[in-house]
Amino acid sequence: MYVSNALGDRRKKVRINLKKGIISYGEAFIDYIAKNEFNTSFDPFLGGTTVNVAVGVQKLGAKAYYICKLGSDETSDFVRKNLLIEGVNQSGCVISETKKVCEVYVHKSKEGDRYFHSYIDSTPHEQVYKHELQEALFEQAAIFYFGSGTLFHPISQETTKEAVRLAKKHRMLVAFDPNIRMKRWESEAACRNIVTPFLSETDILKISQDELLFLMNSADLTESLEKLRAYHIPYVWVTQGENGAAAVTANQTLHVSAKEVQAIDTTGAGDAFMAGILWCVHEKGLPESEESQKQYTTFANALGGAVSARYGGIISLKAKDVSSIKAGS
């Protein structure tokens, strides 16, 4: 299988049939999702953008490698157990006796919508150091994926830069989903200043419309897309919730509508979309035609919709759901 790689002239052809697997680097979370509109009772779920994507691509059938720092307490054991159940490779994870997994409380409004209410992160400085990255993983995998969930910290900023360097050294595709959560940042300006430079290193970008407007500091979608072109990202997907998503290349913007679903819990729907795109690229190569762009986007939309129709995020997706989506793609 040949894909277009954004190394050098961004069109160099490389074989990935000997390189398999998707590395996801970030931070694991435990999502405590409200069971009622009074937000007095919660169910715990394995969570975090990069965890969700790792679980998603593994459920789809691609090998997932996860890199994060974990501790030795029951919350870290909860993460390890669930990653093991899902079949995600944890060999790149780093253990620290003092690390505490970040906890996220997701509340439910009276209208039934869910929203991020608060983070509890008692060990924010416990991050993976760049020297703790295992280069062997980058030698064998085909795609490196990361988010902005750890970029608020100087240590993880340097680790992310090193991971991107290793990915490019070993001819991997670099995928990025900013997935901005402002509660983790000191200011909007700090967030933009740190996140936007990584756009220039990205081959595949998945970004929500709101995040695009925010990062480009604009209230207009067309203007934001024009500003984004300055970063020369070969493949961009802009998600628009129930309205579907747009596949954006240098030559065109292709909008693909999403099928209507009865949304129960939208937590992780965007992560499922990204997992769908990465799986398509991993298995079929980068989309080099309008038809393949539409197929990939339709598949990712369907995966995000399936997750929205279930309580508990992407980890709740069943094998029969995956099979049905694949059959319909």
Image (spheres, rainbow, N blue to C red):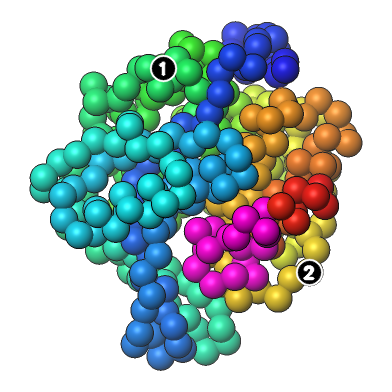
Three-letter amino acid code at disc 2? Glu
Residue 198 lies, with reference to residue 152, above or below; the image says above
Per the image, the residue denoted by label 2 is 260
Residue 47 position in % (x across, y down):
41, 57
**Principal secondary structure, stretch drawn in magenta:** helix
Label 2 environment density (alpha carbons within 10 Å; few <14, some 14–19, many ≥20): few
> At numbered mark 1, what does the secondary structure look like: helix, strand or loop?
helix
Provide the residue span drawn in magenta. Answer: 306-322
Residue 220 lies, with reference to residue 280, above or below; the image says below
Marks 2 and 1, how far apart in space? 41 Å
Residue 178 position in % (x across, y down):
50, 44
User: Residue at position x 29%, y 36% from top?
Assistant: 93
Residue 196 in sight in this render: no
Residue 302 position in % (x across, y down):
73, 56
What label does residue 166 carry, if any? Answer: 1
User: Residue at position x 55%, y 78% from top?
Assistant: 113
Membership of 317 in magenta stretch: yes
Residue 120 in sight in this render: yes
What label does residue 76 carry, if any? Answer: none
Instruction: Give the residue at the far right of this rendering.
Output: 291
